[in-house]
Image: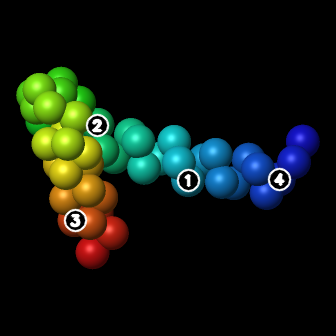
Amino acid sequence: MDRAAYRERNVVERLINRLKQWRRIATRYEKRAANYQAMLRVAAILLWV
């Protein structure tokens, strides 16, 4: 078991789970990829702050 890899994977999985709480991201309301990516960035920034 590689502890460093496990820690990094855990961080990513937790971020994805927190982003899924945003209904707009979980259900992908946005049709265009650029708009969807923009919403992901906004949500990530708000989670980070």
Amino acid type indicated by mark 1: Val
Q: CA distance from mark 4 to mark 3?
A: 29 Å
Name which residue lies at 64% across and 46% down.
9
Q: CA distance from mark 2 to mark 3?
A: 14 Å
Q: Nearer the viewer, mark 4 or mark 3?
A: 3
Q: Quadrant of residue 36?
A: top left
Residue that mark 3 sits on: 46
- Left or right, 3 with respect to 36, comes to right
Q: CA distance from mark 1 to mark 4?
A: 12 Å
Q: Residue furthest bottom?
A: 49
Q: Position of residue 30 (x, y in %)?
A: 11, 32
Q: Earlier in the sequence, mark 1 or mark 4?
A: 4
Amino acid type indicated by mark 4: Arg
- Left or right, 27 with respect to 11, comes to left
Residue that mark 4 sits on: 3
Residue that mark 1 sits on: 11
- Left or right, 10 with respect to 7, comes to left
Give the secondary structure at mark 2: loop
Residue 25 seen in render = no
Residue that mark 2 sits on: 20
Name which residue lies at 73% across and 47% down.
6
Q: Position of residue 37 (x, y in %)?
A: 25, 45
Give the secondary structure at mark 3: helix
Contact (CB < 8 A) between labels 2 and 1? no
Q: Position of residue 40 (x, y in %)?
A: 25, 48
Give the secondary structure at mark 1: helix
Amino acid type indicated by mark 3: Leu
Amino acid type indicated by mark 2: Lys
| Vertical position of residue 42 compared to residue 49: above or below | above
